[in-house]
Each structure stands twice: as structure tokens, then as C-alpha cells.
Image (tube, rainbow, N blue to C red):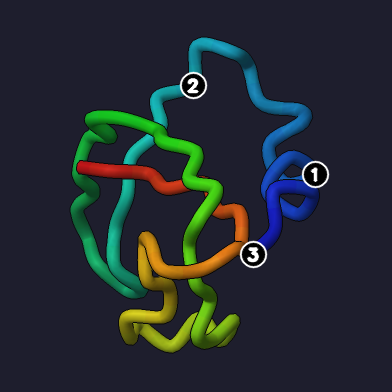
């Protein structure tokens, strides 16, 4: 998912909406601890398949990381 896609999904939500993270088909979510912009990541895959897809270093890709 790109930042543009994320922004389109949430543009109509109230600003007070809690942000959490959860695995697909999971019944509970985890509160977000931090959001981090990384400029030297390496994207290995763009498929949302539950596998590690981005190395948070050793590259030149820009990514937004949501940490819990």
C-alpha cells in the first residue's frame, strides 16, 4: 500500500480515530507505538502476503513504518 492509497482510505475519518494494527482476519488489534519515515529501506516485495517484504536499511527506497 502506498501513502496515497492509505490517505484515500482514511480521508473521511474523524481525526480522533484510534489507529491500531492487526493481522488479516485477526479479532484484536495492537496500539501503534510510533510512526517512522525511513529513507534508506529496500523493498523486496509489494505483495500483502504476510511475509517480511521490506528491509529497513541497505537501500534507497522510502517507506513509512508503523511500529507497535
* Residue ID at (41%, 36%): 36
Q: Which of 23/1 is in front?
A: 1
The residue that mark 3 highlights is 1
Horizontal and vertical percent for residue 27? Answer: 22, 61
Instruction: Identify the secondary structure beneath mark 1.
Output: helix
Instruction: Identify the secondary structure beneath mark 3.
Output: loop
The residue that mark 2 highlights is 17
The residue that mark 1 highlights is 8
Marks 2 and 3, how far apart at CA: 20 Å
Horizontal and vertical percent for residue 49? Answer: 43, 88
Instruction: Identify the secondary structure beneath mark 2.
Output: loop
Pick out the residue farthest to the top: 16
Horizontal and vertical percent for residue 47? Answer: 56, 86
Mark 1 closeness class: few <14, some 14–19, many ≥20 residues within 10 Å: few
Vertical order, 30 against 14 (above or below): below
Q: Earlier in the sequence, mark 1 or mark 2?
A: 1
Amino acid at each position: 500500500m502506498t501513502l496515497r492509497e492509505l490517505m484515500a482510505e482514511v480521508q473521511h475519518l474523524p481525526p480522533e480515530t484510534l489507529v491500531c494494527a492487526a493481522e488479516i482476519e485477526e479479532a484484536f488489534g495492537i496500539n501503534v507505538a510510533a510512526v517512522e519515515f525511513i529513507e534508506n529501506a529496500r523493498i523486496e516485495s509489494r505483495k500483502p502476503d504476510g511475509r517480511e517484504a521490506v528491509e529497513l536499511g541497505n537501500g534507497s527506497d522510502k517507506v513509512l513504518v508503523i511500529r507497535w
